[in-house]
Amino acid sequence: MLNTMPHGNALDRSPVVRLTLSGIIIGWSEDAEARLGHRPDEALGHPIDRLVLLRDRRGWDALRPQLARGEALRDVPLLCCEPADEREPITATFWPIRNERGCIAEVHCVARIGQPLRV
């Protein structure tokens, strides 16, 4: 892949999810399991809207046009998921990842419980 997500301390132990542009989960990290409460076998192959709800009721369809244009989306509010503490806000940052031909190949998502991720 040509584009990569920023690395370093900001992403350490953050739930990382890989998605197709249509919102199907193709990667689910151990930290995603620990913080968002789903095992990989429960998540992989399913739409992100089925497991993690966006506060915008339009769900993934509200994000797809911007991601398809290659725009990263930061601090997208999510509804609380178990086992997260419901008093803490959950936000996500989505990065479209381009392949060698310049097409969006997948989307990487980092969910943050507590303070939004700033990169």
Image (cartoon, grey):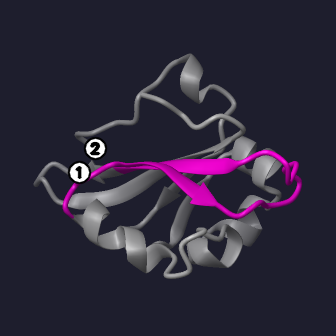
Q: With 51 as the anchor, is 95 left or right in this view?
A: left
Magenta region includes residue 77: yes
Name the residue tied to disc 1. Answer: 98
Q: Quadrant of residue 107?
A: bottom left
Q: Are marks 2 and 1 in contact (CB under 8 Å)?
A: yes
Which mark lies nearer to you, 2 or 1?
Answer: 1
Residue 35, compared with residue 54, is above or below; it is above
Residue at (65%, 71%) from the top-left corner?
53
Residue 105, compared with residue 22, is above or below; it is above
Residue 88, compared with residue 118, is above or below; it is below
Circle 2: residue type: Met
* Residue 24 visible in image: yes
Element at label 2? loop
Q: With 108 as the anchor, is 17 left or right in this view?
A: right
Residue toward you, 105 or 59: 59
Element at label 1? strand
Q: Quadrant of the C terminus?
A: top left
Q: With 27 as the anchor, is 7 left or right in this view?
A: left
Q: Quadrant of residue 22?
A: bottom left
Which span is picked out in magenta? 69-95
Numbered circle sitting on residue 1: 2
Q: Quadrant of the N terminus?
A: top left
